Image: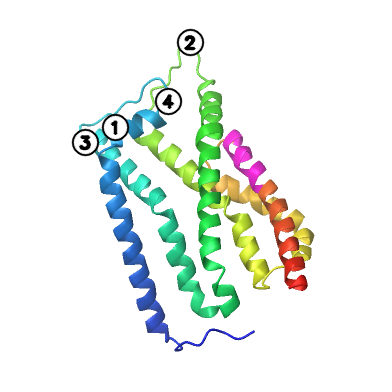
Amino acid sequence: MVKKEQKEMSFLEHLEEMRRRIIRCLIFILVFSIVAYFFSEWIIDFIARPVEKLYFLDPTEAFAMRIKISIIMGIILSIPVIFYHLWQFIVPGLFEKEIKLVIPVVIFSTIFFLIGASFCFFLVLPLGIKFLLGFGTDKLFPMIKIGSYISFVSYMTLAFGAVFELPVVSYFLGRVGIITSRTLAKGRRYAFVGILILASVLTPPDLFSQMMLAGPLYILYEISILVVKFTQKKKVVS
């Protein structure tokens, strides 16, 4: 197995390469954000379905939230481009056989991100918001700021999309020999603690949201063990 022949890059050249790829990603995000802005009213109405009303408390907040939701949608729509440039930045350090994995990895990275984001938006968020608003009383009414709500929804959605990348990352790391299924299996107890810590960091400070992230994340960890085990068997056969 021989690495792809290419000129060895210096540290400054790596930085320049990273800068170019970041700029390309930002251009796509900007373009998609501008397009999303024209649909921002519909997008806000769509994501606000779990609550009756949202409020803005200063004159500029509603406009600022349209800008914010447009940027978030620009990031989500640019996910395939972001993953592509991320993996392409890693490519110079890979073997030629592993470079061929980039396109499949980009495709599955995008699919798993969308699965995670959809799981959060259509299942976790409605249940979570219903649970949290259930603590109101006859004299304690929710008055939800649009800024707080958009931040909560976008943060949770992006967090779920990110953690659902675990099987894809595990497949890639297993394929290049960095991790093994035995290593992952032995690290279950440490992974469980790490997952709880990660869930507490990525979600709002309530037990329901943390468990709704920690549960799927641990299942994904177990799936990752199977993925890496399958990858190792496939490498032995080939």
Element type where label 4 sits in the image: loop
Q: Distance between the residues labelled 4 and 3?
A: 23 Å
Cβ–Cβ under 8 Å for marks 3 and 1: no
Q: Considering the numbered disc 1 on the image, is that residue within a helix, a strand or a loop? A: helix
Q: Mark 2 points at which residue?
A: 138
Asked if residue 196 lies in the magenta stretch, the reply is: no
- Which residue matches tag 3? 60
Q: How far apart are marks 3 and 1 (CA)?
A: 15 Å
Disc number for residue 76: none
Q: What element carries label 2?
A: loop
Crowdedness near tag 1: few (<14), some (14–19) or many (≥20) residues, C-alpha within 10 Å: some
- The answer to which of marks 4 and 2 sits earlier in the sequence is 4
* Residue bearing the label numbered 4: 49
Question: Picture coordinates of residue 59 (x, y %)?
Answer: 20, 32
Q: Of tags 4 and 3, which is closer to the observer?
A: 4
Which circle's residue, 2 or 3, is located before the other in the chain?
Answer: 3
The residue positioned farthest toward the left in the image shown:
59
Q: Where is residue 118 in the image (x, y as percent from the top left)?
A: 51, 39
Q: Write down the quadrant of residue 228 in the picture.
A: bottom right
First along the sequence among labels 3 and 1: 1
Residue 84 in the figure: left or right of residue 196? left
Q: Which stretch appears magenta? A: 207-217
Figure coloring = rainbow
Towards the viewer: 178 or 81: 81
